[in-house]
Image: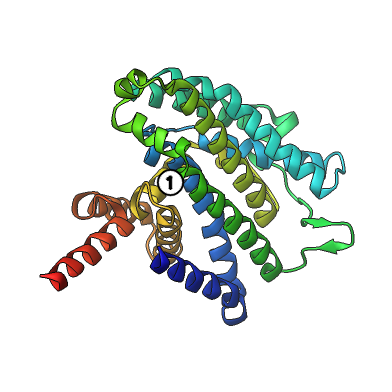
Amino acid sequence: MKKTSHIAFVLLVIALILPQLASTYWVTLITQVFIFGMLALSADLLLGNAGLFSLCHAAFFAVAAYATAILQVRYGWVCVWAASAGIFSGTLLGCIYGLSVRTRGVYFILVTLAMGYIIWGVGYRWTALTGGDSGITNVPAPGIGAFQIENANQFYYLVLAVVVVVVFAYQKLVQSPFGLALRGIKSGEPRMHSLGFRPARHLYLAFVISSFMASLAGVLYVYLNRFVNPVTASLHNNVEAILMAIVGGSGTLLGPFVGAAMILGLRNWVSTFFEMHLAIMGLVFIAVVIWAPGGVIGQLQRIVERKNSEGQS
């Protein structure tokens, strides 16, 4: 426990001093890693703890981003109220879509896939509201009163503060009796029924919490890019978030962020000299699944455990 706390402290110190050492490009890229890592973490609350593979979390991400952008650009709402309304909108959609937990297995995947396509279709076709392909542009910088975010470094620290709070709360959640119940449902739902639990209620609440996290990430995303378009709600965006969690280590706290750093970093690097960069990303994912099925974090944990066992022997 102490070792984990020390590692977390070192990572936090590095994150705090990084903007003073890196260029604006790297600060912006790492900010993007934090945001998409949070989206991946929201999806992994269901995948890593409850065993539910959701394909609609990009919908919550996009609805929150669209609601925030529309309220600020077209109706002149201040940042605090627009962002709050965006998070509420995405979470409200999660309350509705959460009814999908009544299904299991491939049926859950197909239902959430269809739900995700609804929001994607609305984004493309309801041009009067969403702007269609062009999306919503010129979103103002976030701020409260006289305080406004003026540069990439200030926004980085804002996102970092949000991520630290979310990760801390997430850790407390998964270590609580509620989190243990989710893992129990993943391991054996009939057994949890026999013990007096109601798995559907636990899964529904987990779904709503994960939609809140995805919505929060969506609000930060729209403030980072200052625009939003239907691609935000696409299947590609959702699958990429799931891949981040799996590549980094599903069911771990830092895995989704490690996966986000790998995938976004690889995409930005490979795309500069190779048009078929998605093929490279696919090969990396296949390699991780075959040789490191627990993801990067899982592989590191196995290496540490092996060395510890060798040292004891």
**Towards the viewer: 246 or 227:** 246
Q: Quadrant of the N terminus?
A: bottom left
**Towards the viewer: 29 or 202:** 202
**Towards the viewer: 195 or 210:** 195
| Direction from residue 129 to residue 296 in the image, left or right | left
| Direction from residue 305 to residue 275 in the image, left or right | right
Q: Is residue 134 visible?
A: yes
Rendering quarter of residue 68: top right
**Towards the viewer: 113 or 253:** 253
Q: Is residue 230 visible?
A: no
Which residue is identified by label 1?
240
Rendering quarter of residue 136: top right
What is the image's colouring?
rainbow
Q: Position of residue 53 (x, y in %)?
A: 39, 33
| Direction from residue 41 to residue 23 in the image, left or right | right
Q: Quadrant of the C terminus?
A: bottom left
- Spot the residue most to the right: 146
